Amino acid sequence: MPDSHHLKDHYKDARIFNFRLLMAVIIIFILVGVLLGRFYQLQVIKHQDFVTQSDKNRVQVQPIAPTRGLIYDRKGVLIADNRPSYTLSLIKEYLGDIDETLAVLGGLVELRDRDIEGYHKRQKQRRRPFQAVPLKYRLTEVDIARIAVNEYRLPGVEVEAQLVRDYPFGDLLAHSVGYVGRINERELEGFDEDQYRRYRGTHTIGKIGLERQYEGRLLGEVGYEHVETNARGRVLRVLERIDPQPGEDLRLYLDIELQAAAVAAMDGRRGSVVALDVKTGGVLVMVSTPSYDPNLFVTGISYKDYDALNGSLDLPLFNRAIQGQYPPGSTVKPMLGLGGLHAGVVNTQSSVLDPGYFQLKGEERKYRDWKRKGHAHRVQLHQAIVQSCDTYFYELAYKTGIDRMHEFGSHFGLGVRTGVDIPSERTGIWPSREWKRRARGLAWYPGDTINVGIGQGAVLTTPLQLATMSATLASRGELIKPKFVRNVGPEEDAREEDNEDLNETQGLKVSERHWDSVYKAMEDVVHSPRGTAQSINRGLTYRMAGKTGTAQVVGIAQGEEYDSEALKERQRDHALFVAFAPVDDPKIAIAVIVENGEKSSSAAKVARKVVDVYMLDQSDEDAPL
């Protein structure tokens, strides 16, 4: 048996133990040093950085949407308002599982597929961190109560009280006032930095009409709140607030009473009515029928409703007043007659032979009058306007020539945009040699001139242009720029802009006796027993000057007569009427088109009803108190 002395070396074991103990102590000191160093770095060196990051989690900057400016008619009636609405919104940074959150919410409120789809689209758009993204608009009181009871289950879910646009008169003003709608991705991508800043906290933007034209003035300036939140994103307190600046109000020339009278007079027929204040150019009426309810678009229109509007043959979304382009027909005859007098081509005693047609020398084609046997053996200008004699104006046009006709008609605003303060206006066509060469690559022919003489052929006008032409006649040559907005801002500033002379005189100097001759003829269109609008003069307590017109929708072959029964309803002639009143001191000018209305009297009756309401209102204003 070996000696125990040779089996164990206590000294060696002690050295090994001491070495291991020393190494353990050194390692512990190193680890403690690293820990202390890291602690120093976090608590001292990077203290401010982490305080800032902590505050970012606890303190948020939230935008406050400004109140959109209101819109009033000329008598102070509110026609575009803001009303409170509650919106269900989500803050992505506080959400857990989005699908789970949506599932919980779906059990509390009705969530449609388009609500969820719209949320995901808006979530992908450019936004600030911790910015709430709308999921569902117009919550009911029951919806709000259910969400409040389940708030503990819904981190990142908010119910926001917002003001949304409301149009109390529905479809009555849709084509003029327009509407606001949700900001889409294309619009957002087009924002510059200033626009992006201004629209923080705002989900809608003016889409058409005055809402779009005056968007920058109606919007206002965004405000901000610095708020302290808890870990679930709930606001604990407001640390600082910068109030938003509300948008400016618009006060218009539009008259809601006249607008309603015009819509009622149209009686569901397709067409347009435009009336202007002769003194200021203010748009008193702008009707395009049929129309639509702009409230459908404010928080997002359903696919079903949009398809119904967009797919309708009656085109309710189409603003006929500024985008519809129609042949003006005989409504341009007073203006062309005045041009003939001014150019010296004719005088008031000049007459033409009227066999019921006009022929160019050497041509077989006959340009027929609407009255097959003619109006008289010989016709002068007065009778030609009163009875709308085509034969007279065929010859007048031929003698005047397209160059002088184009120049004179341009003074009355034909063939160019009027410059009215709503977007998407079309130019119409007031043809010339240059226009035909440029647009069609063809030369101008005498037959083209003949057709222009009765407002047919290549001529196209919008109802607003016809109203402007009528107002220019009423003002004896001053081309008035139509405008909707009387003033922007406080009501007390309204009269200042009213007194500004915004009429644009185009240098048209026509003899007063020529104006008087045309006025008398237009007056007799309405008040003479043989006038084409004599059917509207019964009971008329003021003197109106007017001119009827019809415009072909489909061509009629040579030798054939217009047969209403043989045509489909949408192929029948349009009915037109332009007028101003009262004759001795014109205040209102109006243009009416009734699509496929055939008889010009149908348009004249609409104008009579609108002007009656206007003149009655003027009488009430003038009555002694």
Image (spheres, grey):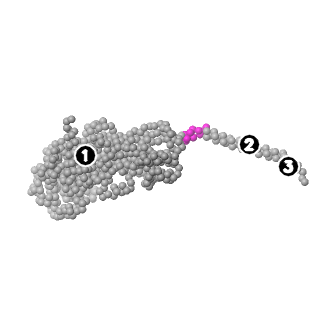
Looking at the rendered structure, the secondary structure element under dot 3 is: loop
Indicate whether 536 appears above or below 499. below
In what quadrant of the picture does the N terminus appear?
Answer: bottom right
Is 118 magenta? The answer is no
- Which numbered tag is attached to residue 25? 2
Is 50 magenta? The answer is yes
Magenta segment, which residues? 44-54
Residue nearer the viewer, 126 or 304: 304
Q: Residues within 10 Å of mark 1 (few under 14, many from 20)?
A: many
Q: Position of residue 128 (x, y in %)?
A: 47, 45
Q: Which residue is mark 3?
A: 8
- Identity of the residue drawn at 18% across and 44% down: 582
In what quadrant of the picture does the C terminus appear?
Answer: top left
- Which numbered tag is attached to residue 258? 1
Q: Is residue 71 left or right of residue 375?
A: right
Is the residue under label 3 in contact with that under label 1 (CB below 8 Å)?
no
Q: Is residue 593 left or right of residue 182?
A: left
Magenta-highlighted stretch: main secondary structure? helix
Quarter occupied by residue 493:
top left
